[in-house]
Image: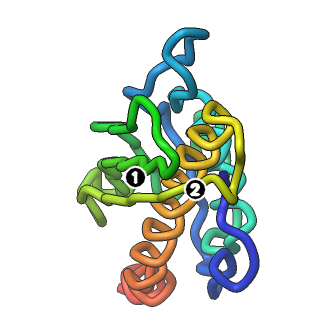
Amino acid sequence: MIPEGDDATFASTDAALVVGTVQGGEASSAWEGSRISASEYRLALIQALQQSNLFTEVASETGDEADYELATFLLSQQQPAGGFGMTVDLVVRYQLIDRRTGSDVFNDKVVSSYRAGVGDAFVGTKRLRKANEGAVRENIKQLLQQIDALSLGATRASSTEQ
């Protein structure tokens, strides 16, 4: 569920990040098919952030020395009941907090969508799982791009010089 290749690597900042709890999400049940749980999403998010090199350190615990904290809220996960092509829509709100000031550096919704067809998986439950994983991957990829655009290293360097 994590972005790979050129989509996952960015210029590093000199800042450390702690990933807070992920709120929302749903556990899967046998009759309902594949769903995204908060714990699975959090693991994918941590791995993607670690691989991205956006931060010098990405902690999954309290991280008292962390410069930033990321709060994540899974707001909506829309998926089809069945079909040959299954599209999953995912809405996640991310809040990146500067731990020194307590202010939001980033607070926005990221919307992603992913379609898995019969060519991706013949069995419907596997196709739905692939669509869910693709929606997560696309959502995290957009988040990484938006964090990269914040130029946190430049902001951090200028604030420490004062």
Q: Position of residue 70 (x, y in %)?
A: 44, 49
Q: Is residue 53 left or right of residue 86?
A: right
C-alpha separation, residue under disc 2 versus residue under disc 1: 43 Å
Mark sitting on residue 99: 1
Image point 28% across, 37% down: which residue?
75
Image point 38% across, 27% down: which residue?
24
In-front residue for pair 41/100 = 41
Task: Examine the image and state in which quarter residue 152 appears.
Answer: bottom left
Q: Name the residue under label 2.
A: 117
In-front residue for pair 25/80 = 80
Question: Which secondary structure, mark 2?
Answer: loop
Report the number of numbered marks.
2
Q: How crowded is mark 2: few (under 14 residues within 10 Å), some or many (20 or more)?
A: some
Q: Where is residue 93 in the image (x, y as percent from the top left)?
A: 30, 49
Report whether residue 145 is seen. Answer: yes
| Rendered position, 75 above or below 17 | above
Image point 35% across, 85% down: which residue?
162
Label 1 sits on what residue type? Arg
| Rendered position, 138 above or below 83 | below
Question: Which secondary structure, mark 1?
Answer: loop
| Rendered position, 30 above or below 99 | above
Q: Where is residue 130 in the image (x, y as percent from the top left)?
A: 63, 47
In primary-sequence order, the first of circles 2 and 1 is: 1
In-front residue for pair 139/43 = 139
| Rendered position, 31 above or below 33 | above
Q: Where is residue 39 in the image (x, y as percent from the top left)?
A: 59, 28
Q: Is residue 23 left or right of residue 157?
A: left
In-front residue for pair 138/11 = 138
Label 2 sits on what residue type? Gly
Report whether residue 65 is seen. Answer: no
